[in-house]
Image: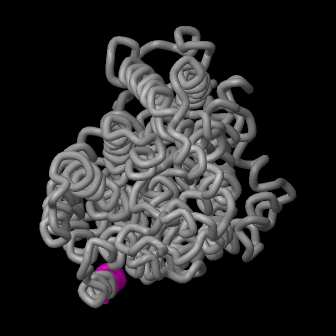
Amino acid sequence: MDWTLFWVGTTFAVYIGIAIWARAGSTNDFYVAGHGVHPVVNGMATAADWMSAASFLSMAGLIAVLGYGGSVYLMGWTGGYVLLALLLAPFLREFGKFTVPDFVGDRYYSSAARLVAVVCALFVSFTYIAGQMSGVGIAFSRFLGVEFNTGIFIGMGIVFLYAVLGGMKGVTYTQVAQYVVLIFAYTVPAVFISLMLTGNPIPQLGFISNVKGEDVSMLQKLSDTLTSLGFAEYTVTNKTVFDVFCITAALMFGTAGLPHVIIRFFTVPRASDARLSAGWALVFIAALYTVAPAVGAFSRLNVIETVNETVYIAPEEDYAARAAEIEAEGGVPSPAWFSRWEVTRLVSFEDRNGDGVMQIRGPNAPDGLGNEVMINNDIAVLANPEIAQLPDWVIGLVVAGGVAAALSTAAGLLMVISSAISHDLCRRTFFRGMTDRSELRVARLAAAGAVIAAGFMGIYSSQLAFVAQVVAFAFGLAAASLFPVILLGIFWKRMNREGAIASMLTGLIPTFAYIWHFKLGAGKDAGAEEWLLGVSPEGIGFVFMLVSMVVGVIVSLATKPPPQDIQDLVEDIRVPGTRRAHGIADEGMAPAE
């Protein structure tokens, strides 16, 4: 029985069944699931929305390669939810709008501000979704044994079906199912591998325990193995403390400014439920994030021990016959999983010295040999069960989890993109007389167009960086452009439309230009000495966030204050239950008499 086909087929049937069952019948359903989602359900859906391909597929890979340096992703992404729960979620829900641009447009009494916020939301969302579609391509390429690009095209079709049909209502309940799938898919193999390597069934404890049958800790053995091959120690980082701080902060504040995360808090009935949702989301996210360092460490050690110094077997060869020949000659054949993954072009072998033996080496290899093995770090989680020779049903479950992680976030981002175009641009800015039916049609068309654009961006982004790093750029853009205007819009009533527009543009343009220059432009080969203040492209969003906040404050103080009713509104949304007394209502609902 093909367990991969079973798990992926079964879970897809569930997702599409939920999308049909929860088909959106109104714009209120399509954008915010009718404001009727329970906080625990919303917390689980938020966790699935959040634990994207970056978290499921790529974060463990980054930790596997970067070691201690990869911990910034754990700290930043988790800390962002604390900020959201305390500073933003309940107040945004109290405001009662569909989208972040809607909040900006009404709070700053300006269509121009709404338009700039739409541009910011689209920049962030498309950057983020490019990483997700790259993850979709990785998962599908291995599952179907096809090339990476073909995997992306297949994923595009699946996302189109359930995101465009169900809207936010369908996406919410689909994401609950996807959370269950992905958390099992992540933790079950980790438990197996932890038992095999350390004898401890708890991965979080296993990777700091001694190796089974040896008097050395797992982390120490991994560090010793790496240094003997010319790599840096696993428990150190080559990043400066300031750069680590900036990356962590950019991820934290970016989390609190991400449109597809914020929109989830508009789906609950009350402001208090929004804070509860954030708390539950953090609990559900922790279930995966605390396992990630163990998965990364196990993966790195397993890859080296199974691949290094083995005799290469090409994918087109009869693996069993060739392996028997190699063993008869006293050699060790390369693992079967490597041959299977080579079809996807995400792993490869270049025999530089012509000896037919696969050598993994770091830049400072003591024997002077160069590295001959390329393994895309984004496959760490998907390949881990195969590397550890776990049962087929576990391997199939992991593929289903990887697909669920990438698709759940891609769907959430499509909601942001479609609502930004149909609601914020069309209905609220250019075509104010648009009916609900017309808006829903435009939303679905926008989502369909976004799926196609996202697929091609996913193909391109795979050449730019690992999935988690592409996603980190989106956080930098969100931190610099959207977080300042949301925070100041809630807590400082003197912030006006001129300040908001200046702040968003000051954050978005330099951050995007910096990332483009050092990742795609003339500076892509530049070293850390050429970075501004020594801050990497992943962390620059925090620097420009501070600049954009200062610019927003200065411009606001230099121009006339907001109208009195807006200042009263800012006071009101921080006091639960008062906004209806001032005639403010959720979209799709009548204001209080």
> Would residue 562 be visible to someone looking at this image?
yes
Is residue 8 a member of the stretch shown in magenta? yes
Magenta region: 1-12
Q: Residue furthest right?
A: 215
Does 295 appear above or below 592?
above
Q: Toward the viewer: 179 or 197?
A: 179
Left or right relative to 584: residue 138: left
Q: Residue 1: x and y, percent?
A: 31, 89
Is residue 540 a member of the stretch shown in magenta? no
Q: Residue at x 45, y 24 (%)?
A: 502
Q: Toward the viewer: 243 or 365?
A: 243
Does 145 appear above or below 425?
below
Quarter-wise, where is residue 432 in the image? bottom left
Q: Majority secondary structure of the magenta segment?
A: helix
Q: Residue furthest top?
A: 530
Q: Residue at x 44, y 82 (%)?
A: 177
Q: Toward the viewer: 31 or 389?
A: 31
Q: Residue 198: x and y, percent?
A: 75, 67
Q: Toward the viewer: 144 or 223?
A: 144
